[in-house]
Image: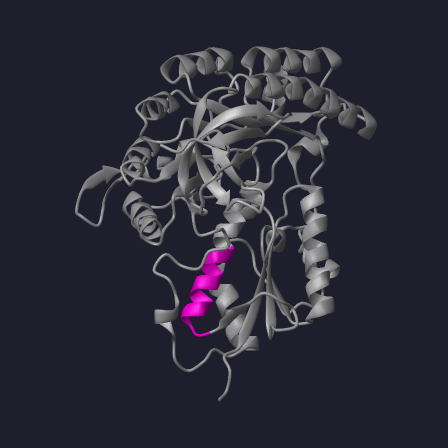
Amino acid sequence: MQRNPRIGVVSMGCPKALVDSERIMTQLRAEGYDIVGSYADADLVIVNTCGFLNEAVAESVEAINEAMRENGRVIVTGCLGAKKHLDGTAYLDDVCPDVLGVTGPGEFDKVYGLVHRYLPQPHSPYLDLVPKAGLKLTPPHYAYLKISEGCNHKCAFCIIPQLRGKLVSRPIGEVLHEAELLRESGVRELMVISQDTSAYGVDLRYKIDFTDEGKALRTRLFDLARELGDMGMWIRLHYVYPYPAVDEVVELMADGKILPYLDIPFQHAHPRVLKAMKRPAATEKTLERIQAWRKICPDLTIRSTFIAGFPGETEEEFHYLLDFLKEAQLDRVGCFAYSPIEGAPANDLPGALPDEVREERRERFMQVQSEISEARMAKKIGTVQKVIIDEPEDEDGVAIGRTMADAPEIDGIIYVTTDAHLNPGDIVDVRVTANQEYDLIGRHVIQ
C-alpha cells in the first residue's frame, strides 16, 4: 500500500507565527499529507521563520540551513521570507538560494501551491483525520487565539508592518467560532494574541458581526473578551497597548470574566525616548493608568517588555526608566538591549550607543526588576492560588503548573507537591509555601 506523502514543519518566532504553522499543518493534513517530527521521515520540510530581531533572523537562517543539511527539500515561509535588503532585493535570495521556494507571512495559498508542486497531494482528502479545532503545536490544554494580523503603528525600532502589513482584524463571529471549537477539543486556557490587541476591530470600524447562534456583536476587544469569558476557559490577553479603552476590559477581570492579566509592551518610560521610538500611547499618563487599573482589579498582573540603550538615550533618561520601574512595580518584565534591525527607521537616529553600554544598561535594568519581582512573589506566600497543571506529578509527588499570573513559556511556574494524581489542564487550589526569584513553591489543597 502506498504511503501518504510526509511533511515536516519547523516553527520559529512568536506565538503568532506558531498559529500560522498550525493553520498550514491543519490544511495539509486535511489534504491527506502526514505531518512528521523528524527530517529523516519527511519528504519535504516547511520552515516558518521570524525576521524581527537580528538574533531571530540568525536563528531562522540556521534552522533553514539545518533543514537543508538534514533533508534537502525545504520551503521557507514567514516574516524572513518578506525581509528585503535596503536595495529592495529579497534577503533570502543570496542567504539560502537552494530552497524550493520562499513566501512571506500569511501567504498560505502560496505555501500550499509550492507543496503541491514539489510533493503532489494524495488523490483523496482525509478531512476526518483533522480535529475540528485544527492541528496544534501547543499542549492539548492551552492554545493561542489570533484575532488579527498586521499593525498600523510605525514604531521606529520595528519592521513588523513591513513584514506583515497593516492591521486586518478577524470578524468577531469567526474568532468566537474558533474559540468554541478549541473549548470542545479540551482547551482550558486561551491566549489572545495579535500585534496590537487593543486595536482589534479598528480597521473594520467595529463592524457588527454574528455568532453561530445569531447574536449580534461589535468587532471590538471588550465584546470579544466578554464573550470569551462566558466560555468557561481561562482567557489571557497579550500585546495590549495602554489605551483608555482598556479600562472597561479591566472591569471584566475584576468581575472574574477573564484572567486578571495584561501583557503591555511599554518599551520605555521617558517621554522623549518614547517620542523618538514613535510609540503609540506615548503621551498617556501610564503610571496613573496602572494605579487606576489596580484600584479596579487589585489582583491584576502586569507584564511588559522594555528596550535599554535606544539611540540617543542618555544616562538621565535611563535613570528615569529605572525610577518608573520602581514606582510601577510591574509583576513580570523582560528587557532587550537595543539591536539595530535592517530597514528600521531607528537606524538613522543620532546617538547610537556602544554595544557594551546597551548591554550594561540591560543588566542594570534586570537587576532592579529582579528585586521587584522577588518581593512581589514573596507576598504570595500563605495565599491560596488557582493553578493550571502543565506537567503531572513526578516520582516525588511534585507537579508543575502556573498561576493566573503566569503565561506559558514566558512567565514563571509553581512547583506543586501533591498526594493526588494531577493531569495537564487540571485547575486546582494550591497554597504557596515559598518563592524563588520568578517561581513559586506550593502544596495542593485538597478539599
Q: Nearer the viewer, residue 138 or 115?
A: 138
Please say if 143 is above or below 42.
above
* Magenta stretch contains residue 30: yes
Q: Nearer the viewer, residue 87 or 161?
A: 161
Would you say 223 lies left or right of 199 here? left
Would you say 195 lies left or right of 225 here? right
Residue 117, position in %: x, y?
54, 76
Kindly give the residue lying farthest to the front in the view shown: 419
Q: Quadrant of the C terminus?
A: top left
Q: Nearer the viewer, residue 101 or 11?
A: 11
Would you say 118 lies left or right of 366 here? left
Kindly give the residue lying farthest to the bottom in the view shown: 1
Residue 280 appears in the picture as rendered:
no
Residue pictured at 50% horizontal, 75% vertical? 116
Q: Quadrant of residue 89?
A: bottom right
Please say if 265 is above or below 46.
above
Residue pictured at 27% horizontal, 46% vertical? 173
Q: What is the span of residues highlighted in magenta in the rendered image?
A: 21-32
Q: Nearer the viewer, residue 383 or 68?
A: 383
Per the picture, the main secondary structure of the magenta-coloured stretch is helix
Kindly give the residue lying farthest to the left in the view shown: 214
Which color scheme is applied? Answer: one colour
Residue 25, position in %: x, y?
48, 63
Residue 421, position in %: x, y?
45, 45
